[in-house]
Amino acid sequence: LAKTPLFQGVPPQAIEVAREAFVTRNYPAGKLIFEAGDMGAALYIVQSGQVRIYRTYLDGRERMFAYLGPGEVFGEMSLLDDQPRSASAETTVDSVLLVLYQDAYWSLVRKWPEILHNLATILARRLREADLELEVLSFEEARGRVAYALTKLRKQRYGDGLKMKLTHQELAQLSGTSRETVTRVLHALREEELVKVGSGYVEILDPAGLEEVLFGLR
Ligand code: CMP
């Protein structure tokens, strides 16, 4: 708990109390935690494993928003505004999650307002990312979108590793394009020696070059 951004700068005593307030839950790989539209007012922290945040549309297509790893927080939106879940959450591997219910959240926040400030910081960061994403998805061609998805995925899921296990279908869901388009764009990026593409993986050869593509600079 001490390592999550939610408890940054919060006194150790608060973390002790918080430990009691959270409920620990084990989830196997591929387990749905909640679905978009569900009511629910608990906040989650990933203790170990990985959670993916996504939405499924009526025509069956899926859009992936994020992969979250250890220390990361989700489910805070419904906790704060009492509206239905904005997206679905599912484990990708066996995971341990810490769950905080609304009453417990409020009693923590009343005693240590730093927690609320930290949550606001997390939301601000996410809004910045969402703004950038909106810009890329509305103004950039498929090329920029695919470069964006690759860059985001690298940062979220692989730290600084550049070789990613990834299918064209997955990349299409992340960049809001079709699988065929992804295949075409990857081919071009490979020709320009920005990426290397193998069966079931994509390796970024030139991260800076890829960021230029993302912003339409090359
Ligand atoms: P909530 O709406 O309660 O449930 C779905 C959660 O997904 C939401 O809270 C956020 O925590 C998380 N979420 C929604 N959109 C994004 C996004 N673009 N990036 C990362 N996490 C998100």
Image (spheres, rainbow, N blue to C red):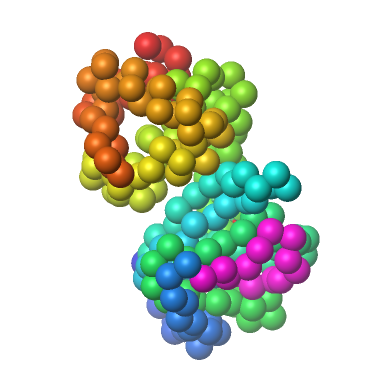
**Closer to us: 86 or 126:** 86
Residue, far bottom: 20
Residue 62 sits above or below residue 50 on the image: above
Residue drawn at 61 percent across, 63 percent down: 75
Residue drawn at 53 percent across, 64 percent down: 90
Residue 56 sits above or below residue 46 on the image: above
Instruction: Assign the C terminus to one quadrant of the image.
Output: top left
Measuring from the top left, give residue 97's x and y in whole percent: 47, 74
* Left/right of residue 9 with respect to residue 201 in the rendered view: right
Residue drawn at 66 percent across, 63 percent down: 35
Q: Main secondary structure of the magenta part?
A: loop
Instruction: Assign the N terminus to one quadrant of the image.
Output: bottom left
Hey, which quadrant is residue 166 in on the image? Answer: top left
Residue 4 appears in the rendering: no
**Closer to us: 18 or 79:** 79
* Left/right of residue 77 with respect to residue 95 in the rendered view: right
Residue drawn at 50 percent across, 88 percent down: 20
Measuring from the top left, give residue 145's x and y in whole percent: 49, 27
Residue 94 appears in the rendering: yes
State yes or no: residue 114 in magenta. Answer: no
Image: magenta residue range: 31-43
Residue 209 sits above or below residue 203 on the image: above
State yes or no: residue 32 in magenta. Answer: yes
Measuring from the top left, give residue 26's x and y in whole percent: 45, 81
On the rendering, which quadrant does ligand 1 occupy? bottom right
Measuring from the top left, give residue 95's x and y in whole percent: 41, 73
Residue, far top: 218
**Closer to us: 177 or 87:** 177
The total of numbered circles placed on residues is 0
**Closer to us: 116 or 48:** 48
